[in-house]
Image: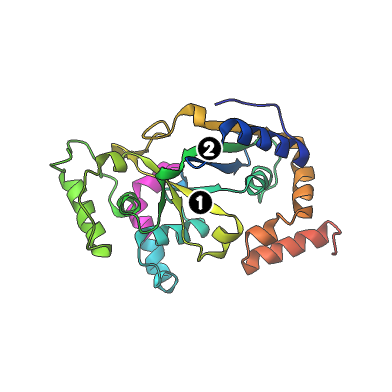
Amino acid sequence: MKENYKIGSIKTFLEKIDDLYKNKKSDENNAIFFRGHFKESYQLIPSIYRHENFIKNEDRIFREIISQIPDEFQDSRFTIDRLIKMQHYSVPTRLLDLSKNPLVALYFACFDDIEKNDEDGEVVVFTLPKNKIKYSDSDTVSLISNIAKRPFSFTTLNSEHTSYNKEVEKLIFEIKEEKPYFAEAPIIDDLNGIICLRPKLNNPRVLRQDGYFLLFGIDKLKEKPAKLSSNWFITEDIEKLIINKNKKKHLLTQLDQLNINRKTLFPELESLGKYIKNNYKEGIFA
């Protein structure tokens, strides 16, 4: 990964993005995605791996949230649709948010509910092959997303393309419950990999944030996430733009002027209420 000088203005940020587009040559074969971290120290792993008790109980977390609010998931046919909804309720999942809009990523590199600007932020830039971008009805998406319903003991070890272990066989059975036509093609490489997901645009937050996701499989054992270096990621395809911690408030003001703010990116009533409350607290009445 290449680290660049610290960014403190929209102008500088967009100049760097323009340079990246020219150098990366986003074309018919590749696409560029962005992710913002409030702290530069954040790891590029999904939230289910940010605490050992989360990943140890992933299957229980998945079922518990559905049992508590079943009406919210009645229209979610596939496991991936349920994971996306859980992600937006701040439930830990194996999804990592991305955006096609660099300004959205910049917002997340500057904003945090706690508002402690004690560390530089970062915008991570991914260049990914378009043929690896999947949709919600993809068999590969079904395969990886249903890992969420398997216990902590799940592993792909001792599995070959023609002979799967019992854990993988149970996973395939579970997938066929939601997708009877699931094709049992060689799947172990997919289970141990990462894919880029283009979700359905039936979620207002996904729509406003021009959202995509990285969907993480495992690294042979469920306790470890798939590696970014596996399959189609290489380190040269990931760059970091460092955001000056002392300029975050200024950048948020500039983004607000471009209508990139909590109100527009989080269209739920609660977020609108917080946005209005904070504006009046700061003396911004229009």
Residue at the far left: name it. 163
- Residue at image position (35%, 46%) is 56
Residue at the far front: name it. 28
Depth check, front residue: 217 or 86: 217
Determine if the magenta segment contains residue 56: yes
Image coordinates for residue 280, horizontal then vertical, percent:
82, 62
Image coordinates for residue 55, horizontal then vertical, percent:
38, 46
- Disc 1 target residue: 212
Q: Main secondary structure of the magenta part?
A: helix
- Name the kind of residue labelled 1 in the image: Tyr
Depth check, front residue: 191 or 220: 191
Residue 5 appearing in the image: yes
Determine if the magenta segment contains residue 207: no
Quarter of the figure with the N terminus: top right
The residue range painted magenta reads: 49-62
Give neighbour class at mark 1: few <14, some 14-19, many 20+ (Cα, 10 Å). many
Q: Picture quarter containing residue 178?
A: bottom left
- Disc 2 target residue: 126
Along the polypeptide, which appears first: circle 2 or circle 1? 2
- Residue at image position (17%, 50%) is 169
